[in-house]
Image: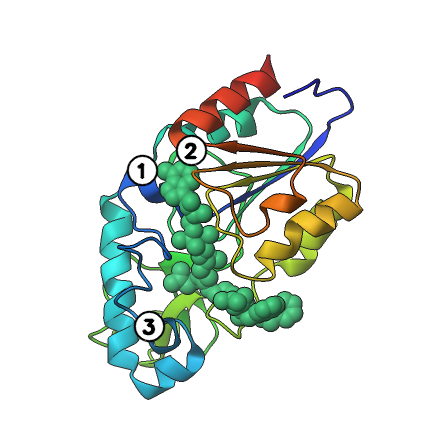
Amino acid sequence: MRGMAGIRNIVILTGAGISAESGLRTFRADDGLWENHPVEQVATPQGFRRDPELVQRFYDERRVNVLAAEPNAAHRALARLDSEWDGELLIVTQNIDDLHERAGATRVLHMHGEALSAWCLACDARHRWTGTLLDGPACPTCGEIALRPDIVWFGEMPYEMERIFAALARADLFVSIGTSGAVYPAAGFVQQAKSARARTLELNLERSQGSGWFDESRLGPASELVPAWVEEVLT
Ligand code: BV8
């Protein structure tokens, strides 16, 4: 990327596209998750109240897929950047998989929650969870049968928005990887970064809905674009 001079603080937003080459389905592709699971049924609090079994089964299946997946070259390249970049760096992911962390990244924030976490609606505790929730297991803290997937559904406030807005306000460089820019508030981050006079770069298979906001767009698979970009940044 033309000269990284003056670039200290980097914010990276990732979406389902970065995990596509790890075998995890994206949302809006032809075989996307929303194709045969209407979003209002499986990813809204109303849908959960209406049919908790349908929702628990949907996320039990996602949890199995996440556990079976492996990080790809794009996740590994961001983990390398995380370990070698001595400026500020925050990887804000919309993904509920743990592939960033399994690749070794630590400066990661899951704004839409995590598949491997269960949230107790009775005592508000959160537990690392690799099993199922459909069979109504008791909360390890309070014993109540009140566990739901620790996921941010539509109409719910994403996690750690203050921390994200603070990082965007300080960003010198904002990079968006593998996201269609269809879901807010994440889709609005590029505008916030621009208003903080950050440089903006998109790495995506195809132009996203917010493509026009980016100073530069590179189109192609994340497993190729991300390692090449990280090499540029670090050398
Ligand atoms: C909220 C967890 C109040 C669940 C998810 C403003 C305008 C309009 C609507 C709204 C608005 N503000 C809020 C809304 C409502 C809503 C919204 O945005 N609706 C949309 C549909 C219009 N937003 C909300 O409800 C949010 N909450 O607003 O609360 C609030 C908030 C802040 C401040 C005040 C009040 C909550 C939204 C979160 C919902 N939960 N996920 C789950 O995972 O099951 S969203 C979910 O869908 C993902 O997390 C992600 O965010 C989104 C999917 O998008 P992507 O990840 O981008 O995936 P997609 O398939 O779309 O695209 C993949 C891309 O990758 C493509 O571009 C493709 O080309 C590319 N690609 C594919 N393969 C590769 C690749 N790129 C590179 N390499 C490859 N190999």
Left or right: 123 in relation to 69:
right
Q: Quadrant of the C terminus?
A: top right
Task: Give the percent coordinates (x, y) of residue 17.
Answer: 40, 44
Q: Residue at x 79, y 40 (%)?
A: 197
Sooner in the amino-acid sequence: mark 3 or mark 1:
1
Q: Amino acid at mark 2?
A: Ala
Q: What is the secondary structure assignment of the residue under circle 1?
A: helix
Task: Tell whether label 1 touches label 3 (CB within 8 Å).
Answer: no
Q: Quadrant of the N terminus?
A: top right
Q: Amino acid at mark 3?
A: Pro
Task: Tell whether label 1 touches label 2 (CB within 8 Å).
Answer: yes
Q: Nearer the viewer, residue 220 or 131?
A: 220
**Mark 1 CB near ligand 1 (8 Å cut):** yes
Q: Residue at x 53, y 75 (%)?
A: 155
**Mark 2 CB near ligand 1 (8 Å cut):** yes
Left or right: 233 in relation to 27:
right
Name the residue tied to disc 1.
21
Q: Amino acid at mark 1?
A: Glu
Q: Quadrant of residue 136?
A: bottom left
Name the residue tied to disc 2.
222
Q: Nearer the viewer, residue 85 or 46?
A: 46
Task: Give the percent coordinates (x, y) of residue 96.
Answer: 41, 54
Q: What is the secondary structure assignment of the residue under circle 2?
A: helix
Q: Quadrant of residue 160?
A: bottom right
Q: Residue at x 49, y 31 (%)?
A: 78
Q: Is residue 163 above or below residue 149?
A: above
Neighbour tally class for label 1: few under 14, some 14-19, many 20 plus, Cα within 10 Å: some
